[in-house]
Image (cartoon, helix red, strand yellow):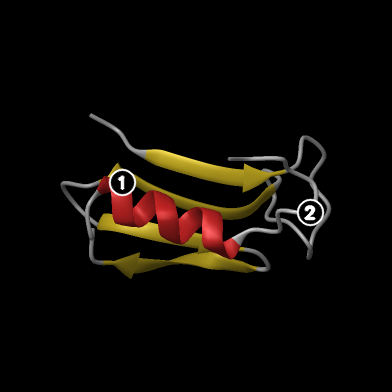
Amino acid sequence: MGLQVHYGTTEPNPPETLQDGTIRRYDNSHEDTKGHELHVAPDPEPKSIAFPGMVELWNRFWSEIPKDEFDID
């Protein structure tokens, strides 16, 4: 099962985004070989992170992205 929470754009704009438009992304696409990762523009190399659980990761993700563009409750 893959996990991904992603904040980005549809049009890449390096160095503000990665080549795929990512601004910030948590994923476990390579969980068996690399574990969980955090991708943050402009650094093309992901950082390995310990998986704290889905609720904590979700809360962390939403606390790290700008919300003035979103109305979330």
- Position of residue 57 in the picture relative to residue 11 (left or right): left
| Frontmost residue, 8 versus 57 | 57
The mark total stands at: 2
Categorize mark 2 by other alpha carbons within 10 Å: few (<14), some (14-19), many (20+). few
**Label ID, residue 68:** 2
Is residue 46 depicted above or below 10 in this figure?
Answer: below
Q: Amino acid at mark 1?
A: Asn
On the image, numbered disc 1 is attached to which residue? Answer: 28
| Looking at the image, residue 59 lies above or below residue 20 | below
Q: Nearer the viewer, residue 60 or 48?
A: 60
Q: Residue at x 23, y 55 (%)?
A: 35
Point out residue 26 in the picture as x, y percentages from the top left corner: 43, 52
Image quarter where the C terminus lies is top right
Q: Amino acid at mark 2?
A: Asp
Q: Mark 1 or mark 2: which comes first in sequence? A: 1
Binning the other alpha carbons within 10 Å of mark 1 as few (below 14), some (14 to 19) or many (20 upward) gives many
Q: Position of residue 41 (x, y in %)?
A: 65, 64
Secondary structure found at label 1: strand
Residue that sits furthest to the front in the current view: 73
Q: Assign a secondary structure to mark 2.
A: loop
Quarter-wise, where is residue 57 in the image?
bottom left
* Percent coordinates x, y for residue 70 in the rendering: 73, 43
Residue drawn where x is 82% and y is 39% of the image: 11
Marks 1 and 2: which is nearer the front? 2
User: Would residue 42 appear left or right of 3 to someone viewing this image?
Assistant: right
Residue in the picture at 30% in, 67% down: 49
